[in-house]
Image (cartoon, helix red, strand yellow):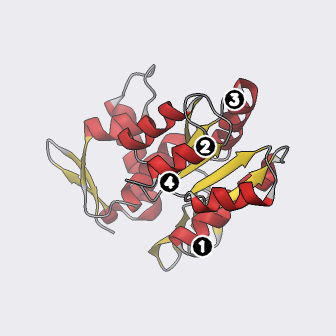
Amino acid sequence: MKRKILIVEDDKDLNSTLVKFLAIKGFEVLSVFDGEEAVDSVYEHTFDLIVLDVKLPSLDGFEVAKAVREFSTTPIIFLTSLDAQKDVEKGFEHGGDDYMTKPFSLSELLYRIQAIFRRVHGNDHTISIDKNCYFDIDKLTLYKDQKRVTLTDKEIKLLSMFLQHKEKTFTREEIFEVLYEYDQTPNEASLRVFINRLRNIIGKEKIKTVKNVGYTYVG
């Protein structure tokens, strides 16, 4: 599954830029524009990371972080034009994990996000399928016999879902929710094609059909 990031930034142009950039890099991204929305979003959804501006309407970023830390340990990267040492210290005191001063480069933000994920999730970002095949979670890429295997976007989503939830039976409806956007029509025939292609690549026995229910990855 894609790692999910919340962007909290009241500058609409910067907010849009961050959302587009991180989506291109393979993350699932939700964005809001003020502090109260941010706290509500973290309470209602599960995120892997929060990118949080300090100067926000309703609640500033420090207040948001303080409120979030009452019920969540989700890592936080502060974005701010404030660069005084006391502001940096305040950010960390309120539960921040990193602090970036505006203006900043998108590539630097990506490096910092990846660094936090390495620290939180460990250095190994691969899931072994067998001795000759593995899946890189960060790059969303399948490798077999040391070569990259080309997969469609939906095949990648499906494989990622299976690998990160081994032995879990997914109904067809649950799979459709992951594979298809709200404006797309789920297709049973296409799902069978995706399943069969993955079986041919990683092993027919690894994805089990659960009759009248869905599919399970058994490894």
**Disc 1 packing (10 Å; few <14; some 14–19; many ≥20):** few
Nearest to viewer (mark 3 / mark 1)? 3
Label 2 and label 3: CA atoms lie apart by 18 Å
Nearest to viewer (mark 1 / mark 4)? 4
Label 3 and label 1: CA atoms lie apart by 39 Å
Q: Secondary structure at mark 2?
A: helix
Amino acid type, mark 4: Asp
Amino acid type, mark 2: Gly
The numbered mark, 3 or 4, whose residue comes first in the sequence reads: 3
Query: Does the residue at mark 2 contact the one at mark 4 (Cβ under 8 Å)?
Result: no
Amino acid type, mark 3: Ser
Residue at 34%, 61% (x, y): give it. Answer: 204
Find residue 15 and report its horizontal and vertical position in percent: 68, 32
Q: Which residue is mark 2?
A: 61
Label 2 and label 1: CA atoms lie apart by 47 Å
Find residue 164 and report its horizontal and vertical position in percent: 39, 61
Nearest to viewer (mark 2 / mark 4)? 2
Q: Secondary structure at mark 4?
A: loop
**Disc 3 packing (10 Å; few <14; some 14–19; many ≥20):** few
Q: Which residue is mark 3?
A: 16
Residue at 40%, 34% (x, y): give it. Answer: 190
Label 2 and label 4: CA atoms lie apart by 18 Å
Q: Secondary structure at mark 1?
A: loop
Q: Which residue is mark 4?
A: 48
Nearest to viewer (mark 2 / mark 1)? 2
Q: Nearer the viewer, residue 81 or 98?
A: 81
Q: Which residue is mark 1?
A: 145
9 relative to 215 in the view: left or right: right
Label 1 and label 4: CA atoms lie apart by 31 Å
